[in-house]
Amino acid sequence: MAPDTLSPPSAAGPAIALVDVVKDFGGARGAAAVRGVSLSIEEGEFFSLLGPSGCGKTTTLRMIAGFEEPTRGQILLHGSDMVGVPANRRDINMVFQSYALFPHLSVADNVAFGLCRKRVPREEIRERVATMLATVELADKADRRPRELSGGQQQRVALARALVNRPRALLLDEPLGALDLKLRQSMQLELKRIQREVGITFIYVTHDQAEALTMSDRIAVMNNGLVEQVAPPREVYERPATAFVAGFIGTSNLIGGRLSRVEGQTGVLDLGEGQQVTVALGGSARGAGAAVELTVRPEKVTLSAGPPGTASRIRGTVREVVYLGTSTSYAVDTAVGAEMTVFQPNDGTATVHPARGESVWLSWSTDHSYLLSAAPAPAAAAAAAAGSPTSR
């Protein structure tokens, strides 16, 4: 039996919307855990809340679920304001890092538990459980007990138990955190497959950047109770909005200074002795003398022994060399004071292989320098995040 679609597309607007949501626990320090978050999450989207511990992502998820009430703001599920509505009356389910399976029940009975509580007819329960176990590829484990399953299989049972109730949205709070690295990577692909097959909205909380990049249609990067950027994974990585996003998502090199001159839509930082950095200004109205901060990813930088002919070029001395298998990482102390990291692929294309203490030139194209904005204030962050989602 093919898995059914649990939630048909809605023409009424976003599946879930947060409007200027604030959560203040009234602590002694007085800082709110969530400070004016606005988000628009589309029907059938795999949407991730990503950020470090304490940034407000789990509190945001718990407010959507109904386990916490916002201090102010709106939480709209398919257009209806859920503030004040109990968790058990919201058409959503939640999966936690601890799977909370009943050890004395079989896999099938664990999955059927919610349906039995709702007094769904027995034959319908049997069919829906069989369909969901097939979706999570555990049909042959229906009679097993949870202790007989691996961690990844237990996680899929917890997913099946949540999805069999046919919620309009599924909330997942770091569900892969208890798994080892290899199994976690495998389950990332499984989760995305399951989400695509069942066709409902997933909201996923994680502090793992690679996890969010692998699975998400869009990512909201949170910091200190605010959303600093909402965008598809490629845009978050390639075009980070702030210095925090650039540093938190992968490895990034940050360079600051004042523009020496502006040539059309390109800003130039002259650094002396043949060194310069160029950056596309885009719509930014910044002239000569303006302070700027930009980022360039380590894999975009090329090492050479002599001065290159590229737009951006800086001299430096190799401080550390680390072999990573598919690439080699170089830590370089530059002549302009910035410490930079370079990832050089081990595919035979590299022209130099410098050792510690050797002098090198670092170079990259203008397109690979990306101008950063200041971290958003609460009102500005809310307005930016509430905008229409980038098309997938």
Image (cartoon, helix red, strand yellow):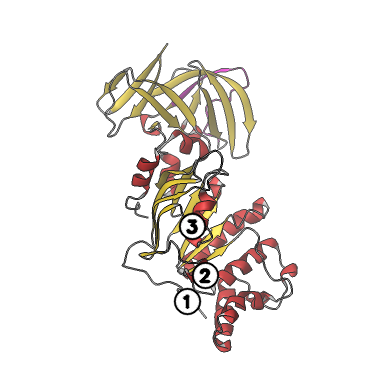
Asked whether the viewer can see residue 349, the reply is yes
Closest to the observer, 87 or 163: 87
Q: What residue type is labelled 2?
A: Asn
Q: Name the residue under label 1.
A: 4
Question: In this picture, which residue range is highlighted in magenta?
Answer: 348-363
Q: Is the magenta stretch mostly helix, strand or loop?
A: loop
Report whether 102 appears left or right of 96: right
Q: Distance between the residues labelled 3 and 1?
A: 33 Å
> Does the stretch in magenta take in 207?
no
Instruction: Give the SS element for disc 3.
Output: loop
- Sequence-earlier tag: 3 or 1: 1
Q: Name the residue under label 3.
A: 69
* Residue under the point 59% across and 81% down: 116
Q: Distance between the residues labelled 1 and 2?
A: 23 Å
Q: What residue type is labelled 1?
A: Asp
Q: Which mark lies nearer to you, 2 or 3?
A: 3
Q: Which mark lies nearer to you, 1 or 2?
A: 2
Task: State whether residue 376 is above or below residue 202.
Answer: above
Instruction: Give the SS element for disc 1.
Output: loop
Q: Name the residue under label 2.
A: 88
Closest to the observer, 207 or 138: 207
* Residue under the point 43% across and 23% down: 256
Q: Are marks 1 and 2 in contact (CB under 8 Å)?
A: no
Report whether 325 appears left or right of 227: right
Asked whether the viewer can see residue 214, the reply is no
Report whether 390 appears left or right of 68: left
* Residue under the point 45% across and 31% down: 296
